[in-house]
Image (cartoon, rainbow, N blue to C red):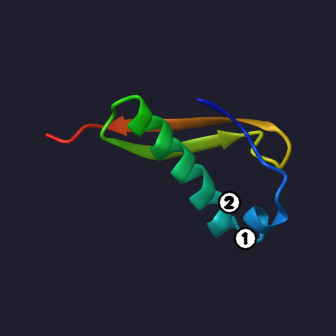
Amino acid sequence: MTHAVPDRPDLWSSEHWRLNYFENRAAEHAETAGEDYAELISVSDGEPGCVATITYRVVTAV
């Protein structure tokens, strides 16, 4: 998926907040697509003001 990354310094105060932000975007995208769970794999171009490519794995509940 792609996502326009906001230019908000508070989101980038630590690696923890950065990863949390992208994990939440992946989870929202998965939920919208009717998927059960998204596990974040990678983020490319995830800098403020860029369009990031977020890769996640779909995990289906059985």
Residue 9, x across and y down, in percent: 84, 64
Going 62% across and 56% down the picture, which residue do you hit?
A: 21
* SS assignment at label 2: helix
Q: Amino acid at mark 2?
A: Arg
Task: Tell me, for residue 50, which label it has, or none.
Answer: none
Residue lying furthest left: 62
The image quadrant where one finds the C terminus is top left
The x and y percentages for residue 34 are: 34, 31
* Residue contact between numbered discs 2 and 1, judged by CB atoms under 8 Å: yes
On the rendered structure, is 12 left or right of 18? right
Please state the horizontal and vertical placement of residue 54, each as a whole percent of the image.
61, 37
Front one among 60 and 11: 11
Relative vertical location of residue 53 with respect to residue 17 in this rendering, above or below: above
Residue drawn at x 81%, y 48% as measured from the top left: 47
Q: Secondary structure at mark 1?
A: loop
In the picture, the disc for residue 18 is: 2
Quickly name the residue at label 1.
Answer: 14
The residue type indicated by label 1 comes to: Ser
